[in-house]
Structures are given as C-alpha cells and as structure tokens.
Image (cartoon, rainbow, N blue to C red):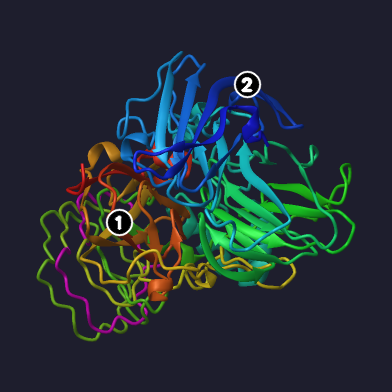
Amino acid sequence: MNPIPLFKTAVLAATLALSGGMTLAGTYNISVDKIRIDTGTFKKNGIGYNRSQTPTVLRFKEGEQVTINVKNNLRESTSIHWHGLVLPFRQDGVPGISFNGIKPGETFTYQFPIEQAGTYWFHSHSGFQEPDGAYGAIVIEPKGGETVRADRDYVVQLTDKHPHSGDRIFRNLKMSADYYNRSQRTLEDLVRDSREDGFKQALQNRAMWGKMRMMPTDIEDVQGFEPLINGMSTDQNWTGLFKPGEKVRLRLINSSAMTYFDVRIPGLKMTVVQADGNDVKPVTVDELRISVAETYDVIVQPREAKAYGIIAESMGRTAMVRGSLSPKQGYAGLIPRMRPQPLLTMADMGGMMDGMSMDMGGMDHSGMTMSSQGTTMPEGMDHSQMDMSGSMEGMDHSKMDMSDDMESMDHSNMDMSGGTQAMDHSKMDMSGSTQTMDHSKMDMSGGKKAMDHSQMAMPGMNHSARDSKIGEFYAPGSGLIPSAANGGKFLSYNDLKAARPLYRDRPATRTIELRLTGNMERYIWSINGKKLEDADPIRLKYGERVRFKFVNETMMSHPMHLHGMWTILDTGKGKWDPIKHTVSIAPGTTVYTETEVDATGQWAFHCHLSYHAEAGMFRKVIVEGGPS
C-alpha cells in the first residue's frame, strides 16, 4: 500500500484554532494518473492514484482538519468521493450533485473536518474510473486510540480487476446481459438435475427460468476478472508480517466494481470489531461476506510461525484471491480449492414476476402483496381449460371480489395468447383462501399491454419480493445463504451490535419505500421502476428520522449506499442496531433501515454495483432546512 508519508506535503501539525484550542491540520496531495496495471495474468491500461496500481492509504486523526489537493493528470474530468465520511455536501465529490468535477489539468482542493474514526475508502465518482483503478483506503485514528488494540495493523483492500475497461464492459452488458456469464447451464447440468429432481421437474424449472430470460447462475453480472488484494493477485501474493502470538488488525475493504467476496483465513478465527467504520461488540467468526463498498475490521492472532492464507472467494465462486499473513517475506499461505458454484432458487425469484425480462410488457404486479409465509403458490386453484385467447381490451376487474374460498382454482393451461390490453386488476380483492393457485402452464405469449395487477392482494401468492421478517436478510431457501467452509460460524448482519449508540432511539416520522427493480435482459436497473433521469429527487427534512423500506424485486443482490448520513440497519436491537454506510439487499427480501437526517444539502443514494448505478439504480436526495 502507498503509505501517507509518500505524498503528504505537510507533516501533521498542531495549529492554534480560533477558539483558542489546538486543532490538528494536515495537507495531502493526490494525483490522478493513467497507469499500466499488471495483475500477473494480464496487463491493461487503467487509472490510479499517485501513479501506482497499489491503493493509496490516507491516514487521518479524528478531529483533524484536512486539506487534500487532487491534481487531475487525465484527459477527462475526474472526482473523488470520500466513501462513508461525514462532511459538508460540497466536499462529497459527486459531479452533478455536490460539485462540477475536476477538469483535465486542474487541481481541486477538498477541505473538511474529520469527525469520526475507523476504516473507510475513497474512489472516483466519474464514469467508470473506479472499476478502472481509481480507489484508495482511509484509516482514521480515534482520539483515545483504538478500543481494541492490536500489535500490527494492515489494510486489506479487495477489488475485481477485469481485462476490459469499464466503458467496454457496460457496452457489452447493454448489448447482452449474459455477455460475461461463463457459467451458462449445459445439457450435462440438465442430466444431473433430472437425476436429482426427475426429468419433468427439471424441464419445468428450465422453462420457468427461460420465461424470465434468466439462469440460476446469474449471481455475478461480470465474470472473467482477476481478484486483487492491495493491487496484487494470488501469484503476486500480498503479505502482512507478524510474530507468533501478536494480535493483527486487518481492515477489510471491498472496493470492487461488482463482486461480493466471502473472506476466511483457514486455521484462524476472526473477531469482527468494526463494521463500516463503526465499532461493534466483538463477535468471533470463521468466515464473513463483504458486499461491494462495505468495510470490516477483524482481529486475528496467529500463534504458529507459519504462513496463513487470507482467502477471498467471489460469492458466485468464479474467482478467488489469496494473500498471506507470514512470519517472514517469501512465505505464502495455502490456496484451497474453490467451492462449488451456488445456484439461485425460486426463493430468490422474489419480484421477478413483475415482468422483469418475462416478455410480459406492461403487465404490472409491482404492488401485489403476498403473505410473508413463503414463496409457494396457493393450493388447488385450477384454470386449466380457461380460454382467454380473444381480445380483452377494457376488461376491468378493479372491483371484483374474490374474497371467498378459492381452493381448486387452476390456471395451469390457461391460454391468454390473444390481446389483453387494458386488463385492469388494480383493485381486485383476492384476500380469501388461495391455496395452491397454479399458473405453471399458463400461456401469456400474446399482447398483454397495460395488464395492471398493481394493487392486487393475494396472500400466499408470491409475485414480488416477500415481506421479510426483521432480521431476515436472505429469503428462506435462497441459494445465496452462506455457510463457512469449515462448518463453523459465518457472520450475519444479525451478529452486529453497535458498541455505542450514535443516536437516541426514537420512532421514525415516516417510511419511504424503495423498490429495487430492473430488466436483466435489457440491462436496465432502477428504483420504483424509474431510472435516475426519469425520477424526482427524494426530499427529506432536516431533523426528521426516516425509515427506508427496501424491497428487492430482482434476482441480484444490491449494496445500497446513502451519501452524507448514517444508515441504521434494523436488526430488531433498537438503540444497539448497527450503524452502516452500505447495506446489502439480497434477492427476494425486504430490509428496513433508518436515517437521522442531520446533514443539509444534496446527496447521492445508489446501488454500489458500478454498472447498476450507471444503468439507473440511483437517486438524488435533497435535505431541506437545517443550518446553511
């Protein structure tokens, strides 16, 4: 890692503040440069800070007033966003929201106070410069020193470096969402599935995935990348030194463009002491999943004089990187065999029935509600011989009452191949029993414009993301539920408990629902069905406490990041709920967070998967009122 003394232009100095007290002040220089990146398996042109592919580490002190001069040596505009830092919005570094960006050849000076401690990171918020290499780490020393002391302290910054540039990757994804999927299902997979589930069931499953233009392997949009630790591949072997018995703090940062990592150190327990820069009650685990943009601090204590591997395996099991903790340079930890690839399940389908890539243009199930009891279809509903092949324009079910028993109602062979324009179920009440409603063979291949189920209530029938229980961060039966490689403890959000409450626990003033939506086939990602350019800003009032309800109606995980304000993740612990800046929303789940609106100005709010944000899963937040 590039340590701070290499580019700090002024030694940290104590200067007399206007108040008569002492304030730390430091000046730092960062250059943004075109660089050559060498992963050991391929070389490419990219972007880096201070002319290096090794991430720069900024080391601040809590209470410091920092001045950071950023010189743009590129032929295009750039920016730096200080991910997770609480600062004036004009210093947040998002072009078009907080400032105009840094033009080629210019030097822009950021100035802001450091009002927190912990592990954070920084990156460009311009185009695809971040996936092209423009990222670094931030370590902020607490005023009184670390609560949990360690003998050694290392940043472990993960990324997913791809041979293609970010611009090229995005163009290819727009051309074909499966362009980088190297895990396509094969005839061999069908044979294996038939042995396990029976041939008929295997074919039905294939047909259902095909209807959605999806595959159970669609866990990672982009494959074929080389994972790096601190800019180094497995062969290059980043190494942190230790003496047996020492406590080592590892500051894990996931600065990937698109990749979640499962991290473990075989032979060592990890004690998690910090999440997203905020101290948590220590919890000891064998493995953890770090979503894009998250940070975790862990303490390990190797007692033997041997090398241990720091293993980061992609969530989709398509790539892995190994770094090492070693008593001396030149030693390397063992490289385990990569585990089998997980497969998405029908539980992860969540909101896919909303018409995302289902060739059901205009058919809207977006507000359809179901029971939180699961994802199975209700029993006995038979429409198998129902013929709806004729024109259905103007067919209005808006006041239709189907609240009585609906057992034995079967749609399995229902033919809706004709026009169904303007078929409106918007106020249709189906709140009665709907056990086993079967649409498995329903043909809806014809025109279906404006078929609206947006308010239809059908308890038990899951056509959108299920209303998860508090503290339920994967859909029951999800193929993404993690397990430790050694069968031990895998970290869950439920394990995180704030070491010190940051805010008084109080009821939220209102709830804002954010449906995470998209069309995988067209590679469009959105919030509440609208891309950034088509949506109004989210308006908050200074001083209020807002509850966000995230409903993931897609089959992808989305790490959601709100700039400028903390996110309190609701795990049911009240004032002890963990405080984060990024929260992962798994497929088919509903997750609640709360935010104390304590920062005036304009802020970004987006999925931190680079190509999802660019495709539209992004919002501007405007905080009204408060101090100028």
> Is residue 185 at all visible to an observer of this figure?
no
* 469 sits left or right of 233 in the view: left
Query: Where 599 sits versus 480, above or below?
Result: above
- Distance from Cα at disc 1 to Cα at disc 2: 39 Å
Image coordinates for residue 204, horizontal then vertical, percent: 51, 64
430 inside magenta stretch? yes
**Majority secondary structure of magenta residues:** loop
Q: Amino acid at mark 1?
A: Leu
Point out which mark residue 514 bears. Answer: 1
307 inside magenta stretch? no
The span picked out in magenta is: 425-453
Q: Which residue is nearer to you in this view: 431 or 90?
A: 90
> Is residue 616 at all visible to an observer of this figure?
yes
* 246 sits left or right of 304 in the view: left
Residue at image x 27%, y 60%? Answer: 513
Quarter of the image where the N terminus is located: top right
Q: Amino acid at mark 2?
A: Ile
Quarter of the image where the C terminus is located: top left
Residue at image x 87%, y 51%? Answer: 327
Q: Which residue is mark 2?
A: 35
Image coordinates for residue 50, horizontal then vertical, percent: 60, 25
Q: Earlier in the sequence, mark 1 or mark 2?
A: 2
